[in-house]
Image (cartoon, rainbow, N blue to C red):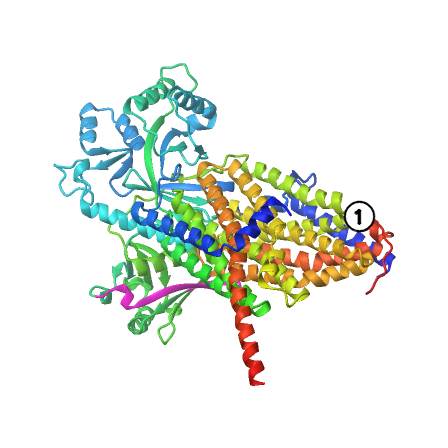
Amino acid sequence: MGKKKSVVLITLISVVVAFLCLLTMFPSFGIPFPVDGTWKTWNPVVNQFALSSDLGGGYYTYYYPQGVIPASEYESNYENISDEDEQKEYKDSYVAWKGLYLEKAETSIFDDEDTASAATVSQEFRTQFAKATKLIMSRIEAKGYSASRVAVVDDFAIRMELPASEVNFATAFQTFGNVGKLELQKGGVVLEELEDADITDFIKSFKVRTQYGQVVYVETKLTKAGKELFKGLKSELTASTDTSGEGTTVDVTLGGEAIMQIYSDFISDDGEVRAAYKIEYKDVFETWGIVLNSALEDGYSEISFAELQTDSVRRFDPVYGENALDLLYIALGIILVLAIVLPIVFYRGYGVSCMYSTLSYLVVVAICFAFISKTAFEVSVGSVLIFLLGLLLVNYFNVRLYNECKAGIERRIPESAMSAAYKTTLWEMVDTYAVLLLGAIIFLTTVGGVYTMALQALICLVTAAFCSLLWGRLINYLYMSAAKDKYKYFHFERKEVEDND
Amino acid sequence: MTKIEKFVKACISKFKLLSIATAVIVVAGLVCMFVFGYSTNATNYDMTTLSVKMNKYAYSQYLDEIEGVANDFFSENNLKYEYDMNAEMHGDESEIVYVFDKGVVFTDAMLANLQATFDALTATDSNHALAGSVINVDVNTEVALDRLPANGLLRTVIAGAAFAVLACLYVTIRHHYTSGLTMFVSLGVGAALTSALVLLTRMPITGNLLYTLFFNLLFTAICTMFTLNKVRAAQKGDKNVDAETLIKSSLAVGQVLTFAVACVVALVLVGAIATSAVRWFAAISLLSVVAGVFASLFFAPALYLIVKKLADEKDAQRARYDYKRS
């Protein structure tokens, strides 16, 4: 390629890379003029990551079983009672247990109110509470948050933390805490057919799918008996009217709460059930899908938690401290500067072309991390490790290429030494990336944080492979073509060689 | 040749020793797990929390003062919290949750003292700006449930095994079955050693172990590929080279150690900014780097030497047989 063409292409690429770097990293500021009539703030790509709770904070709430209250609520209620007798009565109606108070009259906790004490909490309550925590855990695990936490508080309450990336946190908390029985109701009454049978005799599972990116629908996978049941229900629903009092829908309920209403239109003639909703509710129904499947597979708990109020969900700052992200960016900045400056110092012109690989890797990965909206795609400290692993690989292969070229410079001119180095290292790079990509792809079959990490590894490795195998080579080729003195470009000493190639 | 290179070269002819050392560590880890169970004694994972709950009036305007009272109380009682969760105002109430090591105990007297301090500030007849507001203190113990999700562990183990098999197949197709086998065993040894070292060092096992195993497999695969690539290049240069010379000239000591040091720096960085719960993650990952270096730099070349010698002998026998037949 001619020098002029190379210079033009390098200039164009430099402008694009610089623009993307600004897009990725330029600090946020208030735009000094209105955009579409509103004042907006510029936010770089790195500010738009869905951060896990270790970096971005999150939300938490407490689940208190009916009859259990925290000590602060007890104290507050107690102090609000002005009458001494009433205060005594209130005091007598509770049993203190660590930081909680248990209501003596709550039959699910104590078998006998008169003998109620911390030692007489019924075994059944303990068993049902353990079952409820297990149900909540399995739901959190199925949702696949890379960072979440569930803890038993003082033996009889639960605290759950979700990452800030969970946009529908209020729904998630509400939904995950519903550990009641899954039932089908019509007109507020449980279907007769379910009285002597288990719901799994009729429903196999729930699948949440989208169609054309516009509709989300919940598909109820039915057994043969289920199909027969819904065929019958379809004709009943079609015949009934609002005034008949029989109900025009079949409600899927959990712990008595209606989750999904099935209209006759949702039931096909052969008994298939597909409930369609607006796409905006996709995340909500995905969460419901998890909860409904968990209720089908794992059953239910007899206890119920006190209803969550809006003020019982709280937001908290990153657990590393408010400056954790800034510190992390500073540290990453130092690593990036080293990855850019050191090659330039040691390899001169070739080092400059390496800089493009490093920056391109950074930009592509950052953009992918920010705009992949897959559920529970959160950037965590683990993601940073994976990012650095990819960055290390890109730079390792740049160095490897240079060393191979340097080894051949005794016998060749720089162009053919580099060409030979490319040939020598090509399959090394392909093999290494191929093996790693296999790993990332296979780990996509895992769940939770490991799945997220595997997805991030896939992005990092594909980008690193692209930078090492194509992009870096193109940039180097352009720079080499534009360089007047190829020896200076590579920081090699000029020697008279007889090129054999 | 550096001392490290000399040492590595000396080690690769000691496959039995390396195998025994690996087996001993893995068995010791397993015994440790079966006898003592795995460590759940995670600092800051199971925790004691002290929550200061306050109504809107108190929180929105006088947060600093409330925190000041709490901090004075902590310093008077020589208590140090790991981190705090400063919940935003929501509805009529908010709270600050101070998170302590699970061993920290708050006596009734201590709590009464703290509550009394808040009560004095919030008493309606006090002249303090917080007069009339409501502040309550709760102390709770928390037992974390998401230590090691069984389903996640099972899937990670299956994925890890599948990765080892596929990596082995790929390398076998691209290089030779001796290299494929080396890759398979190297990945297995790396993962097994990581798990065993975590069990032996009694580091708390949480879901983070799964991330570490994934990281370890990638790290070990990269470092093993460094050596196998060199072996392939050396074999291309001289096809008649004997196994020992081949592997000794193909050791990627510099590359593996440079890569390991870079990873260690990154992990130390992560550990430095983290709370203790994530420091454990960084610490376990450091162990996985050590295991990965051992598996790829010592064990894999030693194994390759044995397998290559056996393969060469088999090839030689086959060559003699073919010669006789012809």
Give the answer, above or below, for where B270 lies relative to A137.
Answer: above
The residue furthest front is B324
Which quadrant holds residue A79?
top left
Front residue (pair B245, A203): B245
Q: Residue at x 64, y 44 (%)?
A: A44
Question: Label 1 marks which chain's residue?
Answer: A
Residue A458 in picture, x, y percent from top left: 56, 57
Residue A204 in picture, x, y percent from top left: 33, 67
Q: Residue at x 37, y 47 (%)?
A: B146
Residue A457 in picture, x, y percent from top left: 55, 55
In-image side of B232 versus A266 (left or right): right
Decide if residue B205 is in sight here: no
Q: Residue at x 42, y 61 (%)?
A: B158
Quarter of the image that includes the C terminus of chain A: bottom right
Q: Residues within 10 Å of mark 1 (few under 14, many from 20)?
A: some
Q: Which residue position holds label 1?
A: A491
Which quadrant holds residue A109?
top left
Range covered by the magenta-colored residues: A197-218
Front residue (pair A103, B110): B110
In-image side of B314 versus A20 (left or right): left
Give the answer, above or below, for where A430 lies relative to A126.
Answer: below
Describe the element under mark 1 as helix, strand or loop. Answer: loop
Front residue (pair A295, A53): A53
Decide if residue A46 is in sight here: yes
Magenta-span inclusion, residue A155: no
